[in-house]
Amino acid sequence: MSLPKQMKAIGFTQSFAIDEPQSLQEFHLAVPSPSSCQLLVKVQAVSVNPVDTKVRQGAAPELLTDPKILGFDGVGEIVAMGDEVQGYALGDRIYYAGDVTLSGTNSEYHCVDYRIVAPAPKSQSDAQAAALPLTGLTAWEALFDRLHVGVTEEKTLLIIGGAGGVGSIAIQLAKQLTHLTVIATASREESKAWCEKLGADYVVNHHDLVSSVKNVGFNEVDYIFNAADTIGHWDAMVELIAPQGMICSIVESDSGVDLSMLQSKSAGFVWEFMFTRSMYKTSDLKRQHDILFQLANLTDAGRIQSTLTTTYQGLDARVLQKAHALLESGKMVGKLAITF
């Protein structure tokens, strides 16, 4: 297959508010060459995540020499590969969440380590498949690698931010793969209905979290997964977590958390950062392939439903700006994908 030498990509050279025309721009760059452990993918769809907006807002307070290309989730066709790649062939359709330290998927072609990809779900469109990797990996790692939830435990899990991209998958994984009672938070009727549709046993209002949880019959919960606001809900989480319980969060903050508040309960707190394995090239890097493989099987079996709610079309700076603006509005339910 003959590949072009140049490709279109969408990125930025300086951090601006999303309503500024230069916040995202079109660039023409050289098509990358895969290293020994990488695949070169012709990208067919991406999704946009909150991490995209956070990187755009803070990664370049001063003008960059080279553009920063965003995008983590990707679905596409393998068009070239390094000599150490195993288990894949040219033309395979794969999906993945990428590596935060490398150039992103908002481009016509993209390089990714073969150990963090998997065959895309056969039952899903490109847009549906693109909506799954980052949120699916994050939710799976949070539940099973960080909280160490036991699949036979009859305990309680509180998911703060149940209607968001990560929460939407976490609800489903908990209900499909464990015996946990799932309590999800949502404040609007639309987001409450979404959580109920995905299988949450109870939906409570995060604006009065402690009272809302107690009003549905639970004075404490065994596990808390915070996918919305770590600091804003810290006191409530400390009050609600059961003795010897565990809290996991994916939301960073400018100020630290006071772990001493958990001391008397011997409760634990752990971060989940989906890019840890790829960033540090951990010895279990291939686990992300294994998780994606299982997520695809669960999806193809109809046990996990797509969380895609919004689809845009086109590798275009204005389209990406529209997507970023929607995520920054705080009104996004489920996931947003863009097909090329």
Image (cartoon, rainbow, N blue to C red):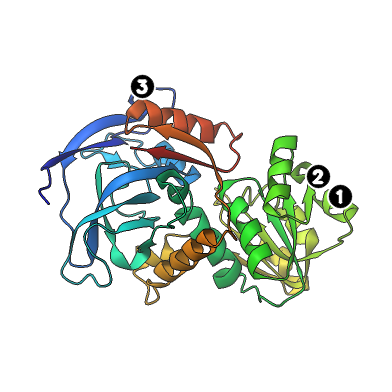
Secondary structure at numbered mark 1? helix
**Residue beneath disc 1:** 211
Badge 1 vs badge 2, beta-carbon distance below 8 Å: yes
Q: Residue at x 32, y 55 (%)?
A: 101
Disc number placed over residue 208 in the picture, else none: 2
**Quadrant of the image containing the C terminus:** top left
Q: In terms of depth relative to the viewer, which is nearer, 327 or 133?
A: 133
Secondary structure at numbered mark 3? helix
Estimate the x, y position of residue 77 in percent, counting from the top left: 28, 53
Cα gap from disc 3 to disc 2, whole angstroms: 39 Å
Secondary structure at numbered mark 2? helix
Is any atom of residue 19 visible in this view?
yes
Q: In terms of depth relative to the viewer, which is nearer, 294 or 266?
A: 294
Crowd around label 2: few <14 · some 14–19 · many ≥20 (10 Å): few
Is any atom of residue 272 visible in this view?
no
Question: On screen, 319 above or below 106?
Answer: above
